[in-house]
Amino acid sequence: MAISYDAIIIGTGQAGPSLARRLAGAGMKVAIVERGLFGGTCVNTGCIPTKTMIASAYAAQMTRRANEFGVDAGPIAVDMKQVKARKDAISGKSRTGVEASLRSLANCTVYQGHARFQSPTEVSIGETVLSAPKIFINVGGRARTPPLPGIDQIDYWTNSSIMHVDFVPPHLLIVGGNYVGLEFAQMYRRFGSEVTVIEMSSRLAWHEDADISAEIQDILVGEGVRIELNAKCIGFSKAADGISASLDCSGTERSVTGSHVLIATGRRPNTDDLGLDKAGVEQDQRGNITVDDELRTNVDGIWALGDCNGKGGFTHTSYNDFEIVAANLLDGDRRRVSDRITAYALYIDPPLGRAGMTEAEAKKSGKRLLIGKRPMSRVGRAIEKGEAQGFMKVVIDADNKSILGAAILGTGGDEAIHSILDVMYAKAPYTLIQRAVHIHPTVSELIPTMLGELTAS
């Protein structure tokens, strides 16, 4: 006989625990199920551990550059065992914090195991069956490994398994030139590895504007990362001195040999083993659970939040999914996925902060545009810090003066972008921020200056 609850939450990523707290606080009897590590991708293999390691890599790089600032730092050595231990401690504290908060939450019962639907209102965990009129799916995603020739003949890492590495690979081959691959590329180069990034397209971060892609490549190449673009036919074979990666099928024998391989070619949702067919829940061709603007599935009483619904793929969008569902269910406040503006960051150094449309997307819209652009070499704060690579750019609708999108590739770009993003959410004209008085010396103070130098495009 099934154990009855008011709500069942499957998964403890960014949306699940917060939703459990809201529902339990509203007096509902809640069950939350976790089959693996509490906290999901962000806590265990994503944001927290990777940015912790990036911080270590940044410290190593700045120590190498110490003489530029008049500081004698002496010989530099990276102890990867200590880097990993620091990462594990910080990630572990977050994970145990999530678990402890759920286990101590009134009106909430924690189940550990693999949840599978038995019907639209029933979920089994081993021999235990739970039932509820409301079920929320927050199962996240995992690394996608394409069927590249020879990949079954070699050992390779994904973004998850590389978290266990406690040494510096002599030569790391990274397949994939987008966010995950680029962050690991710079990180391990700074730790001391030789690094080669292999990308099938003609440029890195191909969905960004071409000028941003080119600047990202210049930053990485400047630190000694090797870039192999247009690798249309990637395959692997064992070599006497490591692993050989072939880069095309044209007979030119274009290849590169490294000691280790990281596959960073995208993500897939963890939806293939939930028994969704028994609940009648629809999925798209990528395996994402199909949801409407309020994150409801096609089955009444079932919602999907976070990476498994294909609506964001970031920690902040997953948390916003929780906010949308909670507002609609508990607050009488209609909130929708379509209300949010695309925003994210690429955490290379210097970072890229992005909001709204790219310039290329804006041009396709047919709108009359105004473009503002300023190199970080003309931003005093960046010069003072010795971090003057990159540039900032903004795209404006010339007719109504709204901000369509912006990118800040430069020191503090991941923070300064919010100065623009908040004005976009306010639906205010760009002149509002243009006339603002920002603090000197900061990166943000040059945003109004850039907005005063717009040109037609």
Image: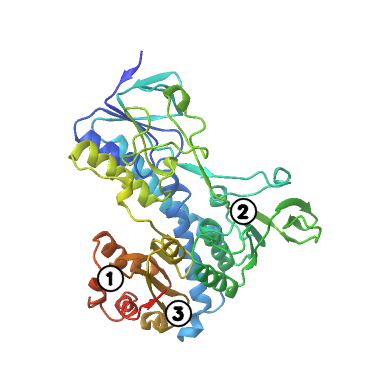
Q: CA distance from mark 3 to mark 2?
A: 30 Å
Residue at figure coordinates x 39%, y 43% from the top left: 306
| 261 relative position to 383: left or right | right
In the rendering, at what x and y percent does residue 226 appear? 64, 68
Kind of residue at badge 2: Leu
Q: CA distance from mark 1 to mark 3?
A: 25 Å
Q: Earlier in the sequence, mark 3 or mark 2?
A: 2
In the rendering, at what x and y percent does residue 48 appear? 42, 54
Q: Which residue is mark 1?
A: 430
Kind of residue at badge 3: Ala
Residue at figure coordinates x 19%, y 31% from the top left: 27
Kind of residue at badge 1: Tyr
Q: Is residue 30 above or below residue 98?
A: above
Which label sits in the foreground, 3 or 2? 3
Instruction: Name the foreground residue: 282 vs 456.
Output: 456
Residue at figure coordinates x 72%, y 51% from the top left: 235
Disc 1 secondary structure class: helix
**Can residue 262 be seen in the rendering of this structure?**
yes
In the rendering, at what x and y percent does residue 320 appear? 31, 48
Q: Earlier in the sequence, mark 1 or mark 2?
A: 2
Disc 2 secondary structure class: strand
| 241 relative position to 388: left or right | right
Which label sits in the foreground, 1 or 3? 1
In the rendering, at what x and y percent does residue 219 appear? 54, 73
Q: Which residue is mark 3?
A: 388
Tag 1 and tag 2, C-beta contact below 8 Å? no
> Quarter holding the N terminus?
top left
Instruction: Name the foreground residue: 409 vs 202.
Output: 202
Q: Is residue 136 above or below residue 249?
A: above
Q: Which residue is mark 2?
A: 262
